[in-house]
Structure formats: structure tokens, C-alpha cells
Image (cartoon, helix red, strand yellow):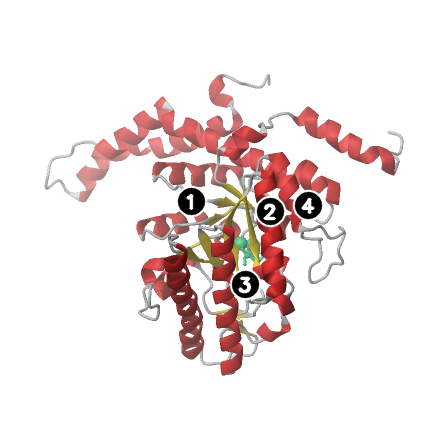
């Protein structure tokens, strides 16, 4: 193949993307509660060992491009859009007004706001550090984010505690730190009750997000389960206002099964928001686009969520790879992530309707009808042929994922 000069590369990417097919029109994409973060689209590819590969883009660019793609909702950290020194000041009001204008011009809604309590040097020892003034500042930040959320019409606030943890063991008292972290959430909920009352709006849903490693060496709330325990620890003044924002990859990172973590959150009535992405077990937070690594697991996650009527946001919390250009972020990264999600969502619907899976599942649930009081051996004997259906269901799920249930075979 001949070299492709720079001025022909975007056209090539677009032609091949077109040739991939399998895309949905924006109006179909908008039917889903898919949310696009400001930070994901504006991520420049920088990380611990990496210089940026992309140039900065503004919230106007992100909102406009999300609108074109058909991503109906936008979300942000406070400092993704407001410089730290302007927080809570006049400059913030002006920026928030410009965001409102941009959202309404492009027909998007703000679904969620979140507070950055991990990047700025003030949070070097975390948002619940020993010094009272750091904690007071953290409380100001989360209260201020609640204000921004109500201004922008958000329904959700997310908290990734980030640096709640330590590098040097023994330097902090974990129990005190957790109490202090609860104080910040209490401050946010109390401000929310106040502002919501004044604005005659519902209070926000406050959603905790766990990540097992990064950016501290040890993390105090590393999993969604730890957060469930924290919510019901008695430290929160309004536990009913606080739920979870699990991230698919963050559960996988510690070696857990995301589907089981989601099931535990569902049973607790706390699955309110969901960060969707992909990656690898027991590795760092690679934030790859949904379905690129574990499509079968993702299919099963969505079958579970459909079965239990999850109707919260699906937040595209992935990072376009460093190898993707500014143009590629909106030409390939976001539309392809949305379309893989929708396809997997639809396939999950097929799974739930599939007569073979349905009959097999019903049969397993009916059991063999062994008489009451039968001993262990007799119960197993009675059921053992039925139990083969587990593997058959697994086979059928792969068939449905690959389209083989529609009669597609390969000539050998
Ligand atoms: C950061 C983190 C994400 C969180 C964001 C919300 S910040 O990018 O890695 O998983 O969802 O604070
Ligand atoms: Mn996340
Ligand atoms: Mn992540």
C-alpha cells in the first residue's frame, strides 16, 4: 500500500468507519439514557507516563459533537469547566450560564455533576485529610457542585473519592478518615435538601463510585460493596439519598465479577448510575470503550440489568486511546462506543426472548420434582440431566452474541 499523506487520513478513517456499518442514527441513540462526560471527550491522552497526544477542546465543542452523534446527556466535574480559583465566584456563574446556553442550543441535558477531589494539590492527602481547613474546603467543593447541579438541572451527583487512602501505612487513622469523608457527604446532602427545597426540584441522587487501586497505594473504600457498607454504617445523615455509581472496569480490576457486584447493588436498591467501559482483570484503570474487551460478559451484564428493570444512566466513562486523534474522538471513539452499547442492549433483549434459553431456564427452575425428604444422592440423581442445561445456555449465549442462532455457519 502507498503511504497515506496526512491530508487524506481523516477521509480514510471516515470511509472505513462508514464501511464498518452497524451504526445507529442519532435519534435511535437518543432513546437510550446514555451520558457523555466532559472529561472523557476532552481527555488529551496524558497519564503518568504519557504526554498528551490531542489538543484541548472546550465544553462547547464537546456538547456540539455529542449532539451530532446523538448522545443526549452531558456530565462534568466542577473543575472540568470552572477553573479552581473561580469556583463559587462570579466567574462560575458566567460559565454555568454559557453551559446552559450551549446545552439548550444543542438539545442536550446535564444529567450529572461530580466534584474533582483528587487532582488539585490541596487534595494531596485526600478530601478527608487531618487538617480541618482541608476538610472544610472539600465540604465547600461538594456543596458548590450541588449548587451547579441544580443550576444545570442535573438529577445525579457522583463521588469518586479518589485519594481517600494513603501511601504510607500507619500515617492516617482509617476510621477517622472515613468519619471525615462522611462529613463531606453529609454537607452535600444537607445543601441539596436546602437548594432543592428553594428551587422546588427533587433532591439529587448522590452516587458513590469505588476504584480499587489508584491514585493512592491503599484505598479506604475500594469496592462497591465497601461503599454499600459505608452507606449503612450510620455515619451518613441521609443514607436514603446516597447510592452507587459502580464502574464496570473498577469491579473487574479487583478481580470481581461486575455482574455479581451489580446484582448486590440492585438487591440493596442502590444501583442508581453506571459507568460503562471495559478493560482487563487485575490491571490498572485502562478505561477502554465498552465491549472492546469483554463483549460476552457485557452481554450478560445487560441481560441482568434488563431483567431487573435498571433505568438509570449509562455513562460513557472511557478514555479514547492516545492513538486516536482529536478528529477520531468524535468520528470513531464515541459513536462506536454508543453503537456497541446499543447493539449489546438489543442482543440482551434477544437473549431474554430466546425460546431455547427460556425453556432451559424454566426447566432448571422447575427442577426434577424429587419427592420431599429425598436424600442428597437421590436429589442429584433426579436433577443431573437437567443441570447439563447450564452449559447449553452458555453455548446459546455465545451463539446469540455471534449471530449463529440465525443459522450462520462457517464452511469447514
Ligand atoms: C476519574 C475516574 C472516573 C470517575 C470520574 C468521576 S473521575 O476519571 O477515573 O472513573 O468516574 O469523578
Ligand atoms: Mn468512572
Ligand atoms: Mn475507570
Q: Earlier in the sequence, mark 3 or mark 2?
A: 2
Residue bearing mark 1? 312
Alpha-carbon distance for marks 3 and 1? 26 Å
Q: Nearer the viewer, residue 239 or 167?
A: 239
Q: CA distance from mark 4 to mark 1?
A: 26 Å
Q: Look at the numbered disc 3 and say if its residue's Cβ is closer than 8 Å to ligand 3.
A: no
Q: Which mark is first along the chain, 2 or 1?
A: 2
Secondary element at tag 3: loop
Taking depth in this image into account, of 125 and 91 the one nearest to the observer is 91
Tell me if 335 is positioned left or right of 371 in this view. Answer: right
Residue labelled with disc 3: 213
- Looking at the rendered image, the disc whose residue lies closer to the viewer, 4 or 2, is 2
Query: Where 400 sits versus 144, above or below?
Result: above
Does label 4 or label 1 sit earlier along the sequence? 4
Placement of 22 over or under 124, stated as above or below: above
Viewer-nearest of discs 1 and 2? 2
Residue at label 4?
61
Expressed as whole percent of the image width and height from the top left, the position of residue 125 reads 56, 76
Q: Secondary structure at mark 4?
A: helix
Q: Pointers 4 and 2 in contact (CB under 8 A)?
A: no
Query: Which residue is painted at 52% across and 51% down in the image?
Result: 249
Query: Would you say residue 385 is visible in this rendering?
Result: no
Amino acid at each position: 500500500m502507498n503511504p497515506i499523506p496526512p491530508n487524506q487520513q481523516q477521509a480514510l478513517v471516515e470511509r472505513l468507519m462508514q464501511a464498518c456499518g452497524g451504526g445507529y442514527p442519532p435519534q435511535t441513540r437518543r432513546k437510550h439514557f446514555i451520558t457523555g462526560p466532559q472529561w472523557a471527550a476532552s481527555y488529551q491522552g496524558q497519564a503518568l507516563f504519557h504526554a498528551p497526544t490531542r489538543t484541548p477542546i472546550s465544553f462547547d465543542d464537546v456538547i456540539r459533537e455529542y449532539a451530532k452523534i446523538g448522545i443526549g446527556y452531558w456530565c462534568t466535574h466542577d473543575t472540568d469547566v470552572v477553573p479552581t480559583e473561580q469556583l463559587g465566584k462570579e466567574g462560575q456563574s458566567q460559565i454555568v450560564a454559557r453551559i446552559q446556553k450551549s446545552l439548550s442550543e444543542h438539545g442536550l441535558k446535564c444529567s450529572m455533576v461530580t466534584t474533582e477531589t483528587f487532582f488539585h494539590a490541596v487534595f494531596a492527602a485526600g478530601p478527608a485529610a487531618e487538617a480541618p481547613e482541608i476538610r472544610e474546603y472539600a465540604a465547600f467543593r461538594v456543596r458548590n457542585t450541588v449548587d451547579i447541579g441544580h443550576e444545570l438541572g442535573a438529577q445525579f451527583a457522583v463521588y469518586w473519592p479518589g485519594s481517600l487512602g494513603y501511601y504510607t501505612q500507619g500515617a492516617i487513622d482509617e476510621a477517622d478518615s472515613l468519619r471525615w469523608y462522611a462529613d463531606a457527604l453529609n454537607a452535600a446532602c444537607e445543601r441539596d435538601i436546602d437548594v432543592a427545597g428553594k428551587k422546588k426540584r427533587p433532591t439529587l441522587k448522590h452516587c458513590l463510585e469505588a476504584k480499587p487501586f489508584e491514585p493512592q497505594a491503599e484505598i479506604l473504600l475500594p469496592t462497591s460493596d465497601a461503599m454499600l457498607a459505608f452507606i449503612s454504617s450510620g455515619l451518613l445523615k441521609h443514607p436514603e439519598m446516597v447510592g452507587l455509581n459502580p464502574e464496570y472496569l473498577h469491579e473487574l480490576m479487583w478481580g470481581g465479577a461486575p455482574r455479581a457486584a451489580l446484582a448486590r447493588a440492585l438487591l440493596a436498591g442502590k444501583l442508581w448510575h453506571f459507568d460503562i467501559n471495559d478493560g482487563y482483570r487485575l490491571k490498572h484503570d485502562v478505561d477502554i470503550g465498552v465491549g472492546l474487551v469483554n463483549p460476552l460478559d457485557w452481554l450478560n451484564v445487560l441481560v441482568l440489568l434488563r431483567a431487573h428493570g435498571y433505568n438509570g444512566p449509562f455513562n460513557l466513562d472511557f478514555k479514547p486511546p492516545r492513538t486516536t486523534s482529536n478528529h477520531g474522538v468524535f468520528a470513531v471513539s464515541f459513536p462506536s462506543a454508543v453503537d456497541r452499547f446499543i447493539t449489546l442492549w438489543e442482543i440482551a433483549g434477544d437473549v431474554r426472548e430466546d425460546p431455547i434459553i427460556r425453556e432451559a431456564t424454566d426447566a432448571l427452575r422447575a427442577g426434577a420434582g424429587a419427592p420431599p425428604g429425598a436424600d442428597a444422592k437421590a436429589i442429584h440423581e433426579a436433577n443431573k440431566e437437567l443441570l447439563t442445561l447450564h452449559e447449553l445456555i452458555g453455548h446459546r449465549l455465545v451463539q446469540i452474541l455471534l449471530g449463529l442462532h440465525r443459522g450462520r455457519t462457517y464452511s469447514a
